[in-house]
Image: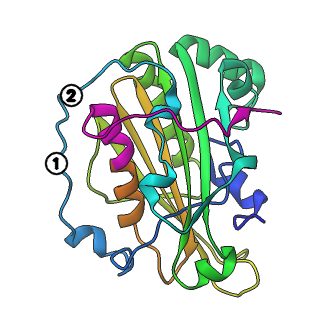
Amino acid sequence: MRLLPFTWLLALLPFALACGGGDGDGGDDDTGGAAAAATATPFPNDTSRSPLLEMPASRFSISQDDLGPGYITDIDFTWKLDGDSYGRTKTFPSPEEGWRLLAEWGYLGGYETSYSPEGYSRAVLEGAFTVAVETHLFATEEGAKSAYQYFEQRLSESVSQPITAFALGNESSAWRAVNTSEGIAGSSVAAELHRYLVRRGNLLAMVVTYGAEPFMDVEPVYRLAHVVDSKATGELEAVEPTPVSKPAGN
C-alpha cells in the first residue's frame, strides 16, 4: 500500500527509484505550520568538516532505531545501488546518460529505503508521515559536489519549490510540494512533501517526508537529515543495517 501516487512521485523525484511512500517520523513537536522551522533552534553545523567516507552508503541512512516505535520498513522499496542499477533509474534522462554521469562523478554506490507509520493512511490523516531516504557515496568530494549540483537542478525543474530551512553539511537545500489533485488515499486531504538535500564530504543524501498538508512543515525533514549528517561527521554511530535490502531491479 503506497501513500504517494507513483505518477506524482516521478514528477517530483530526481532520486527517482520508488523512494515513494514519502515521509516518516512523527512527534508532538513536528506540527505547527511552515513557521515552525523559523522559530526552532538549529543544530550546530561545522561546514569545515568534510570527511572522505567509505562504503557501504547504508551506514549513513536512517534506521528504525532513529525513528523510534511505530514505523515499518518498506522492504519492497529498499535497495542497494551500484552504478549500473542507479544509472538505469528515472533520475537520469537515459541509462547511457546515467552511466556516463555516474562514472564522471566517481560513484561508489548507494542505498535507498523508506518507512511507513503503522496504520498507513489513517495514521497520516492523524498527523503521522512516511519517510524515504537515499544515501550515495562518491570517490571524491568533487564528484559529490557535481552530483549535488545536478540534483539541485533537477529539483528546480520539478514542481517542488525551494523553501527556507536551516543549513546542514557542506551544502544543503530544502524543497516543498503540495498535491491537491491526488491527496492522501481515501480522503480529500491534500498531500504535502518535503525534501532535504545535503552533501557532507563525499556523501550526498536526500531525505523525504510525506504527509497530510495540515500537519506538515519542514522541521521533521530537517531533523531527519541532521541524523544522516551526524552519522557522516561521526557524532552518531554509523552502523550498517540488518540486511533486508536487495539489489535494485530484483
Q: At numbered mark 1, what does the secondary structure look like: helix, strand or loop?
A: loop
Q: Is residue 108 left or right of residue 243?
A: left
Which quadrant is home to the C terminus?
top right
Q: Residue at x 45, y 59 (%)?
A: 67
* Distance (Cα) linking label 1 and label 2: 12 Å
Q: Amino acid at mark 2?
A: Arg
Q: Is residue 80 left or right of residue 231?
A: right
Numbered badge on residue 110: none
Which x, y percent locates residue 138? 48, 19
Which quadrant is home to the N terminus?
bottom right
Q: Is residue 161 magenta?
A: no
Establish if 193 lies above or below 90: below
Q: Which residue is mark 1?
A: 44
Q: Is residue 3 left or right of residue 161?
A: right
Q: Is residue 233 magenta?
A: yes
Which x, y percent locates residue 74? 68, 53
Q: Residue at x 41, y 71 (%)?
A: 217
Which x, y percent locates residue 140? 40, 14
Establish if 37 lies above or below 74: below
Q: Residue at x 24, y 38 (%)?
A: 235
Visible in this render: residue 149?
A: no
Which x, y percent locates residue 86? 68, 28
Of residues 155 and 235, which is closer to you in this image?
Answer: 235
Look at the image and give the residue range highlighted in magenta. Answer: 227-250
Q: At numbered mark 2, what does the secondary structure look like: helix, strand or loop?
A: loop
Q: Which residue is mark 2?
A: 49
Q: Amino acid at mark 1?
A: Pro
Disc with the residue nearer the chain's start (1 vs 2): 1
Say whether marks 1 and 2 touch (CB < 8 Å): no
